[in-house]
Amino acid sequence: MHLKWQEVAVAIGVVVTLLAGKHLPYVSSLPLARVTGILCFGYAIFLSLRLLQADEATRVGDWSELRPSIIEKFGALVLAAFSAVIIYAMLFLDGGHSASEQLAFYATLAVLFGGGALVILISSFLTRVRWNHQHIEHQDSFGKRTTIPWTEVRGVRTEWHGITIHTRSGGKVRFSAYQAGAAQLARRAEQTAQRNARADEDRQAS
């Protein structure tokens, strides 16, 4: 899967914001340089794992199925670990020595890291997307199942945070763009949407 410009823009924007914050009097006492270094190191790992991301889905009998990719597994584990380490340090190691603004900063980081791990868990590990020659099947983290026949597919919208396959009647299936096999499913859905559009044109012409 090709690197998206949004992935680069978000990383550069966050780093520039943190570096600029070092020169602001209200936040200059926060360890922004250390956080910037951690983010840069993490982004380098992210780019490396993107090269290892599988483009092919897993075959299970007659079904092709999306699975969490190595980048999602690593991301969820690291974010959860960072959140847990920060909370542990605040509760048991700090002993009230840090200033209130630093504690608020650490608490915010813990919430952001934990929230990121939770988003990955919900969008990739607790959902199921699979397809065969007849239809696409999506089951979300609450067990709700959505089925879309291939003959009803009318378009695919690819964004940096997810891919959506939709029908003319308003049905849709959304999945993470980072899952193993996501690019394969998106390509097939786009090709199917084009064939369905041509079929509709031929019916209207006749």
Image (tube, rainbow, N blue to C red):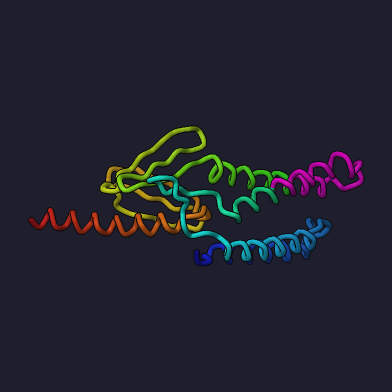
Q: How many discs appear?
A: 0
From this viewpoint, is residue 25 visible? no
46 falls in the magenta region: no
Residue range (magenta): 80-108
User: Residue 32's x, y, as percent?
Assistant: 78, 59
User: Residue 45's x, y, as percent?
Assistant: 67, 63
| Residue name at image x 82 percent, y 46 percent | 103
Q: Farthest top residue?
A: 143
* Image vertical order of residue 58 relative to residue 169, above or below: below
User: Residue 10's x, y, as percent?
Assistant: 59, 62
* Image vertical order of residue 170 relative to residue 182, above or below: above
On the rendered structure, is 175 left or right of 121? left
Q: Farthest left residue?
A: 206
| Residue name at image x 92 percent, y 46 percent | 97
84 falls in the magenta region: yes
From this viewpoint, is residue 167 visible? yes
Q: Main secondary structure of the magenta part?
A: helix
* Among the 4 quarters of the image, the one containing residue 196: bottom left
Please tell me which residue lies in front, 176 or 96: 176
| Residue name at image x 45 percent, y 58 percent | 183
Q: Farthest front residue?
A: 61
* Among the 4 quarters of the image, the one containing residue 193: bottom left
* Among the 4 quarters of the image, the one containing residue 147: top left
Please tell me which residue lies in front, 28 or 145: 145
User: Residue 52's x, y, as percent?
Assistant: 58, 63
Of the 4 image quadrants, the one containing the C terminus is bottom left
* Image vertical order of residue 109 relative to residue 5, above or below: above
Please tell me which residue lies in front, 166 or 191: 191
On the rendered structure, is 140 left or right of 17? left
